[in-house]
Structure formats: C-alpha cells, structure tokens
Image: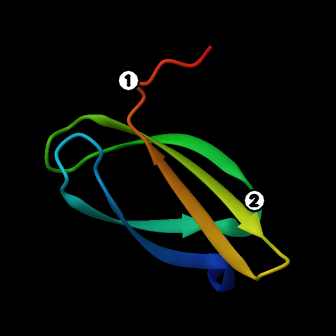
Amino acid sequence: MDHAKLHDASVRCPHCGHRIHLAIDSSAGAQDYLDECRACGADIHLVMTVDEVFDRIVVRVRSDDENFY
C-alpha cells in the first residue's frame, strides 16, 4: 500500500444518513466495491474514480436498492 495514495473520505449513508469516514486507497485506480454502514448495517455501494486532470478523487455513493436497466 502506497501511503501517499491513501486518502480520507467522509460520506453519508444513503439509508440512515449517518456520516461514515473511509480510508480510500487510490493506488489501484478506479474501484467499485461494497462497504457496510457502521450505524445501520446496510450495504453501501461505493464507486471511486481518479480524476488525474484535476488531481482529485471522486467517490460516489449508491444504496444498491436502485434499479438499473
């Protein structure tokens, strides 16, 4: 793990609204994974992308109860 590419992120649970602090490792590039809310236990779908043009990391939160067609 490259500690220079380890970042803190604060997101809100789409189910209960609890704020969750995450350690994001951007060394592997874009990632798509599930994490569990520490307050309500619901699964949170996280989509992390690295925007190298603007030198930032974008984390999108999904509740996974959305329908995709």
In this figure, which residue is indicated by the disc labeled 1? Answer: 65
Name the residue furthest right.
53
In this figure, which residue is indicated by the disc labeled 2? Answer: 28
Observer-nearest of 54 and 44: 54
Left-right relation of 22 to 13: right
Q: Secondary structure at mark 2?
A: helix
Observer-nearest of 26 and 63: 63
Which residue does the image show at 59% across and 76% down from the upper left?
6
Which residue does the image show at 61% across and 65% down from the upper left?
58
Q: Amino acid at mark 2?
A: Ala
Which residue does the image show at 67% across and 86% down from the upper left?
4
Residue 13 at x, y = what percent?
28, 50
Q: Amino acid at mark 1?
A: Asp
From the image, which quarter does the N terminus lie in? Answer: bottom right
Q: Secondary structure at mark 1?
A: loop
Instruction: Calculate the distance from the C-alpha at mark 1 to the C-alpha at mark 2.
Output: 27 Å
Left-right relation of 57 to 13: right
